[in-house]
Image (tube, coloured by chain):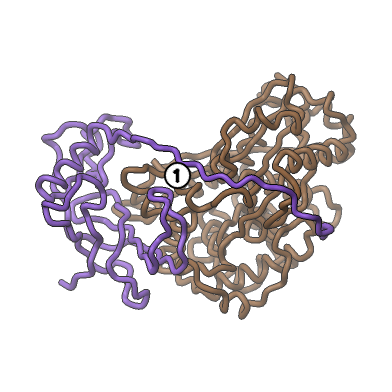
Chain colours: A brown, B purple
Amino acid sequence: MANRVAIVGIGQTTHSGRRPYVNDGELIYDAVTRALEDAGLTINDMEAVMAGNMDMFEGHHLNDAMLNLYSGAAGRPGFKMNTGGTVGTMTAIQGWYHIASGLYDVCLVIGWEKHDEGPATPAISTITDPAVDRHFLVGAIGGLATVSVAYMQRSGCKLEHAAMVRANASQAAHRNPMAHMREIYSVEDVMKARMVMYPLNLLMCCPTSLGATAMVLASESKAKKICKKPVWMKDHVTVHVEYGGAQFGIGEKRWTSHMEAGAKLFKRNHITKPMQETQVFEMYDPFAFAIPMWLEDFLVCEPNEGWKLIEKGALKLEGEYPVSPSGGVLCTNSIGDSAILRVAEAALQLRQPIRRCTLHQLYRRLRHT
Amino acid sequence: MKEKVQEELIYINKTMKIPYKWRTGEVWGEFFRELKENGIIYANQCPTCGRAFCLPKDVCTRDHTRCTDRSKWIPVGPKGTLVTYFMAEQSFLLPTTGEMLKIPFAVGIILLDGATVILQHQLEETDEEKIKIFMRVEAVIKPKAERKGNIFDIVHFKTITE
């Protein structure tokens, strides 16, 4: 049986689109310092350091080694994750494994990205095969636009619903001092935005942000000594799928990595009614259709119900089932940091006494094969 | 927490130009040879589950079986059905050429007749009103003299009525 693992310290930088007066190492140092302060520990208490970043964006490989003076990894075990958009959560999961296994008691995990240093779309296009797919992908946005069109066709969701999602996210981000895009937008504002890639307009896409997040993870015996309110990381699921017809329901029943992850997670945690048994969902929502579509795919709600929940206002900050109360990736997207920030924001939700929540983070990892 | 605006410090501007040579491997090599020499789009088949892949796969994702048996290849398309699409109305830097994308640029996810796996390629139609999901499309293949044995031997997919 694995040891229980808790989040005992959280630190993040402010997020923005451009910070020409800092380098990426300084971002890391900032986040690490804040996480250590939050835990009331020093770098010497850290037994291992895990780093996560998508290195095509800044253009240097092995940057965890180059930047170990900032992260505090020098002289400590640990390694770097580089798994695209999911890298942050994977880094947190690596910390979880190291503690759950009993190997270490206290572990520092860090995710960062400095998006103002390189072009995002060509960098992300390199995830596909150069011989066939790379020219036709056009970054993450190309792939996300295709699934959005298919979702609209399948479920009856309209562009207006995506605009409602973005308007809700802007309300949430406005209350989050660390978020990047904190401006409030109405549904009309979102609908009027310039079209980037049909069906996604400028506001329905996530921004390119920069920032870093660090967390201190601890074993059960240490966690209770370090802080009064440790947040437990209960479970996680990672899924790989085939990139083929299944995600569009072509030639076979529709089946995606999200569905596989949701089914596994809920089954082994004996959750039968996710919307009643959990109280908040911090989702990696990189485009406005993600929330309705992936709530359905994660089996949180019934198929074709996602956009109806949006219409009812149920997913708003003050609604019955808030999704991404931090403003989500729609308002802050510093890729290597985005996914670890979801874990951190979910933990922050649990720490606040206002809302008693049960945390069931759903971890996703998409891979094109 | 708005930060105080600070003076912009020095930055170093560099463009990396790194030449690569990617090998297509046995299956894609054969796929591109057929496309170049005969103008035929082929799908290969998994000997275990029998699915026909186009674009072809070296190994079946589900069965982990090599799919190199040439006698099991079947010609597919050139007609097919549009599963979904996107339409770029803003230009982006392309990692394959280093040039900016010519817009409007529509890309379709297409299921070729006879195949069980989808293919992603450019659509001729760029009027968003005229692109309909499940519409029929057909591959336009370059004349033989212009074909080079790469994915651009297929110019694009045009809309057809049947």
Under circle 1, the secondary element is loop
Front residue of B8/A359: it is B8
Q: Chain of mark 1?
A: A
Q: Is residue A222 visible in the rendered structure shown here?
A: yes
**Which residue appears at 20% of the width and 44% of the height?**
B149
Q: As rendered, which of A231 and A368 lies closer to the eye?
A: A368
Q: Position of residue B84 (x, y in %)?
A: 36, 62
Side (left or right) of B74 relative to B15? left
* Residue A98, x across and y down, in percent: 68, 25
Image point (81%, 59%), residue name: B5
Tell me where residue A18 appears, x and y as whole percent.
Answer: 69, 56
Q: Quadrant of the N terminus of chain A?
A: top right
Residue A279 seen in this snapshot: no
Nearer to us in this view, A44 or A165 = A44
For disc 1, the marked residue is A126
Residue kind at label 1, given as amino acid type: Thr
Q: Position of residue A174 (x, y in %)?
A: 76, 66
* Quadrant in which the C terminus of chain A is drawn: top left
Give the side of residue A90 with respect to residue B56, left or right. Answer: right
What residue is drawn where x is 33% and y is 71%?
B126
